[in-house]
Image (cartoon, rainbow, N blue to C red):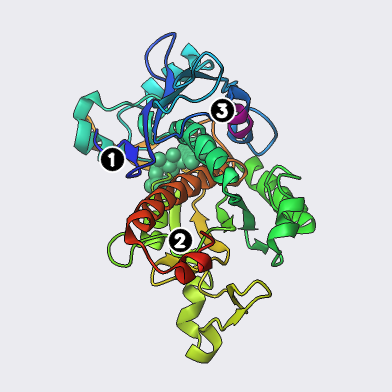
Amino acid sequence: MLGNSFGRIFRVTTCGESYGKGKGSGLAVIVDGVPPGLKLTREIVQQELDKRRPGVGKLNSPRKETDQCEIFAGLGQDGLTTGAPVGIIIYNVDTQPIHIEQYRSYKDIFRPGHATYPFFLKYGEAQDWCGAGRASGRETVARVAGGAVAKFILAREGIEILAYTVECLGIKARPLSFEEAKRNYRKNEINCPDLDAAKKMEKAVLKVKEEGDTAGGIIQVVAHNVPPALGEPVFDKLSATIAHALCSIGAVKGIEFGAGFQVGRMKGSENNDQPYLDEQGRVRFRTNNAGGLLGGMSTGEDIVVRLAIKPTPTISIQQRSINMRTMKEETLSPITRRDPTLLGRIYVVAEAMMAIALLDALYLARAYDSLARLDKKWLKLKGL
Ligand SMILES: Cc1cc2nc3c(=O)[nH]c(=O)nc-3n(C[C@H](O)[C@H](O)[C@H](O)COP(=O)(O)O)c2cc1C
């Protein structure tokens, strides 16, 4: 399997499967590019992992994983990072034979909406049929651990990242400022900071769950206090790096920046964000249709991205499919363990990937700046 690393200077590499084989199976991340002397504790990482942990609440998979992490590399005797790669491991604990046998019973049947078909075409009979292997949502636990390290480093630079639900089953949250969204962050299971809309969304999802079905939705990811001029103008636009990071998460089917698809319905005079100078002489913008990105580089305004999240593919409703061994059409019986919606868990994965993408871009920008020797006037505008 190729492509298990992301990032150029700040780089994460993950491994591990949903089930794996036997006791001791789990998921791990190796993080390159961690500065020395940081008081990185397991609690800092654990706090992020707890946000995506399954088995808690009604909108969440009943799989009971504790998701306890250990930092097994990169820390010195004083508990500070040494500058060496940081390694973090999370063991699987709820891999019961009853569920393994359930997966075995339909291992040859293409699970509609899931990664089964291309897995057969790439890995043949050896494909990991148990819980979808690397295509499982469980794969994202290692990203969240790596993202926790990135968030920790970004926080030192004053950069914050928040993701939350803005739409589900036709119910929309009202537009909220960053501060308001932050105040109501994770106040409900669906993680929608418009508390009235959240109640309606949760009720609607529970109804869909009773029917044995699942629900999709839209999340918004906001990066706050990002310095201007991150990203490169051609192939390595920050927008492209962010899209790569976020679209690599399973179940993400759409992405838009700022006003997004709405720009296609606007006039230039409506879309253009007009700049002004604030009291400190910094360039700011009166609106943010650009979602904090111009020419693919950051402007210093909030980077605002929305992601369309598809309904969880596994459902408790009978479906028509194909047995890939016999190459005959078959009926797939209802399947039990799954998330009725991914909204209450995927947001923290999106925050992690945004953090990794931004930190990597920050490293590159600082490296370039240190050799470019620009006039101080431009450095001042970048806050340097
Ligand atoms: C946090 C998270 C949890 C997920 N949980 C489930 C699940 O319980 N059942 C399921 O069928 N898919 C789940 N998925 C979605 C699948 O991983 C994804 O739909 C699948 O890999 C197919 O990829 P695609 O949707 O990008 O085409 C989850 C994804 C994420 C990110």
Closer to the observer: label 3 or label 2?
Answer: 3
In what quadrant of the picture does the N terminus appear?
top left
**Residue at 65% in and 76% down:** 278
Give the CA distance from mark 3 to mark 2: 32 Å
Q: What's the amino acid at mark 3?
A: Leu
- CA–CA distance between discs 1 and 2? 24 Å
Is 337 in front, or is 362? 362
Question: Which type of secondary structure does the marked residue at label 1 adopt?
Answer: helix
Q: In the rendered image, which residue does mark 3 sit on?
A: 40
Q: Name the kind of residue labelled 2 in the image.
A: Ile
- Which residue: 46% across, 36% down? 143
**Residue 342 is covered by the magenta coloring:** no
Tell me the crowding category of disc 1: few under 14, some 14 to 19, or many 20 or more residues within 10 angstroms, Cα based.
some
Quick one: label 1 or label 3, which is nearer the N terminus?
Answer: 3
In the image, which residues are magenta? 44-49
| Main secondary structure type of the part rendered in magenta | helix
Image spot of residue 64 (x, y percent): 60, 22
- Residue bearing mark 1: 117
